[in-house]
Image (cartoon, grey):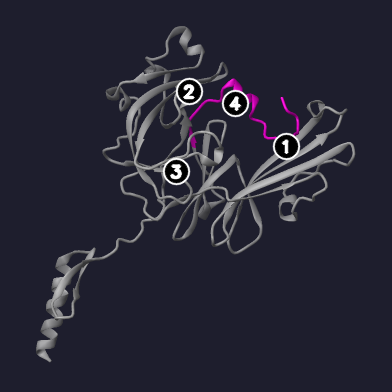
Amino acid sequence: MMNGAMRAGFALVLALTVGPRAAWAQVDDGSAVVVDMPEPDRGCPVKPEFLPVTPMAQVGIDRLGWLVHQAIIPASKDKFFKGGERSRSGVKPVPADMARKLGAPDTSKATLWVFGKEKSKACKGTPIAWWAARMGTDEDRQTFLMAELAMECEVLPPGRLAGTPIVLRQKEEPTGCVLRRPNRSLTGKETDGIPPDYAEHLPPQDCASPGCARLWEYFGVTGEEGAGAFDLTVSYLHRNGSNPCNWATDDVSILFARAPEGTALQPLKPGGQLFGGLWDFTGLRYILSREMGVLYAYDFQKLKAPPKVVRYASPTEEDLLHAKRTLSPCKK
């Protein structure tokens, strides 16, 4: 009995000395070997630091790719755009030694992790060049510090909103945290009724055929557990002649969240256009949307709290021109 207790105690001491991620295992001949224990997934961070991205072409760089937001350069430190240059858009390179002084995050203390394609894990991104991008209109024009990244994974090229990457800054790799893209949609014709759980959130609108037509569509992202986010747009078209471009329109867009245990939709404010969500082993963690140069990240576990907001661009005249989300058939 004493020998058995001694052996058990000796085995415990050996197991403790191996380390928290390894253990002893006994093989057929009775000897013991060290085996690595799998490290549990960390999941998505509790307090994430999101860095939105912008297409290179949007700031004036004639290449296909993305720039990640670093900081807003205050006017007192903006040495790149002076005099008349401050009244128009432009882009200029920023020396690496100046980038940190202008607010670029210190990647030696926390890594940039890039979420790109659907359900792929985050990969490491390393800044290789910095740019000062002057953006906006006369009413709101600012200079933004952006970084070009060398990424260890593939991302979709700029184009569709649903392909937009998102960058997360933290020290350790967010293992088990994945980005899901919108994976379902439904479009309603003029004679199709809006699903009741969406319709109950719409403001009253006087729209009767044939003088008025109502069109609607929604798209959403969901996981296996049923939780998700949905983006609804409804357009009321007031017919006036045969040319749709002469019709007045009333447009409504609402972003919703749905919990896995219920069917009720919860409107999210200030909304924004849905482009994905982050999931881990606990389920849906963050709903991601953006609108007019602002990223919104809604904590799914705290939907009553305001979302995390990151300003990463100033809308241009073209952005403002196409800002209205409508289902109008007008082709201009």
To which residue does mark 4 refer?
319
Quadrant where the N terminus sits is bottom left
Q: Quadrant of residue 273?
A: top right
Q: Amino acid at mark 2?
A: Val
Q: Nearer the viewer, residue 167 or 61?
A: 61
Instruction: Calculate the distance from the C-alpha at mark 2 to the C-alpha at mark 3.
Output: 21 Å
Find residue 116 and name its label. 3
- Give the residue at x 10% y 89%: 2
Q: Amino acid at mark 3?
A: Gly
To which residue does mark 2 refer?
59
Where 20 falls versus 174 (above or below)?
below
- Give the residue at x 75% y 34%: 328
Instruction: Give the mark nearest the N terminus, 2 or 1.
Output: 2
- Give the residue at x 57% y 48%: 182
To which residue does mark 1 refer?
327
Magenta stretch: dominant SS? loop
Magenta span: 310-332
- Helix, strand or loop at label 1? It is loop
Where 286 falls versus 83 (above or below)?
below
Marks 1 and 4 close (CB-CB < 8 Å): no
Quadrant where the C terminus sits is top right
Where 301 falls versus 188 (above or below)?
below
Q: Quadrant of residue 217?
A: top right
Instruction: Give the mark nearest the N terminus, 1 or 4.
Output: 4
Where 328 falls versus 44 (above or below)?
above
